[in-house]
Structures are given as C-alpha cells and as structure tokens.
Image (cartoon, helix red, strand yellow):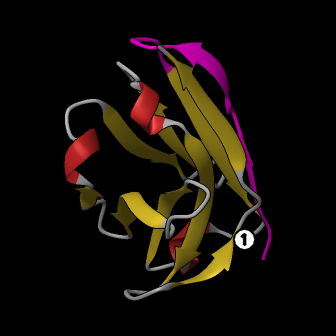
Amino acid sequence: VQLQASGGGLVQAGGSLRLSCVSSRNIFTFNSMGWYRQVPGNERELVARINRGNIRYYEDSVKGRFTISRDITVDTVYLQMNNLKPEDTAVYYCAAGGTGNPDYWGEGTQVTVSS
C-alpha cells in the first residue's frame, strides 16, 4: 500500500491549505484513514480521522478549523485547513489502517505557518 501526501507549503497565519492523500488501494478496505502531524522533538499526534462509516474525529485544537473528507472515486482523503496558526506548523502525515494504530504511513508533507 502506498499513500502519497501532498499540498503542504508556507502560508501566513489565517490562511488556508488543503492536503491530499492518494491511496494505491481502495480506501474502503481500510477501517479508517487519518492525518497526523509531528514537530521535531515531539511525538506524532493524531489531527483528524475518518472511518469507513464516515464518522470523523478531530483533535481539540483544530476543531472548527480543519475538515477531513474523502473522495472514494479517486481513493483520496483530504484535510482542509483554514485559519491556520503558527502552532499548526509541523510535518503532516497521512495514515491508514484499522481501529488502533495505523498500519500504513505516507511520506510527510511540511506545513509552515508564519506569524
């Protein structure tokens, strides 16, 4: 399984970015897909997740600003990030798997938010 993430970049605070994650496998074969982020020196943290039943989870700090969605016709999961803050700066990773820790990881995409 390959997960190809893209869409990161440099944006000013208050701006928006949309991350995309294209799966080499039908995304319905995964129980869930999600986006994680990691800052150097910190553990990787779950930002948002969507499961097969379209139930979504968001980490508290991104609620109301980030939206996870999917397009099953192109096996892609998106993370729309609005009103970005400098503390959102991190490497973002796409992941897929079951109900626990992900089984598959994509390469990260850097998101940098300037103040």
Region in magenta: 1-16
Local secondary structure at mark 1: loop
Residue at horizontal 44 percent and vertical 37 percent from the top: 88
Q: How crowded is mark 1: few (under 14 residues within 10 Å), some or many (20 or more)?
A: some
Residue at horizontal 68 percent and vertical 72 percent from the top: 105
Q: Pick whichever, 76 or 10, lies toward us.
A: 10
Q: Is residue 22 above or below residue 104?
A: above
Residue at horizontal 54 percent and vertical 23 percent from the top: 113
Badge 1 amino acid: Arg
Q: Is residue 8 magenta?
A: yes
Residue at horizontal 28 percent and vertical 41 percent from the top: 62
Whether residue 97 can be seen here: yes
Whether residue 74 can be seen here: no
Report the side of 17 relative to 68 (left or right). Answer: right
Q: Whole-percent x and y of residue 108? A: 72, 54
Report the side of 69 relative to 112 (left or right). Answer: left
Looking at the rendering, which quadrant does residue 66 occupy?
top left
Q: Is residue 50 above or below residue 9?
A: below
The number of numbered badges drawn on the structure is 1
| Outermost residue to the front | 41
Q: Quadrant of the N terminus?
A: bottom right
Q: Pick whichever, 50 or 62, lies toward us.
A: 62
Q: Whole-percent x and y of residue 92? A: 60, 50
Looking at the rendering, which quadrant does residue 104 occupy?
bottom right
Q: Whole-percent x and y of residue 41? A: 57, 63
Q: Is residue 58 above or below residue 51?
A: above
Q: Does the magenta stretch include residue 51?
A: no
Q: Mark 1 points at which residue?
A: 25
Report the side of 24 relative to 114 (left or right). Answer: right
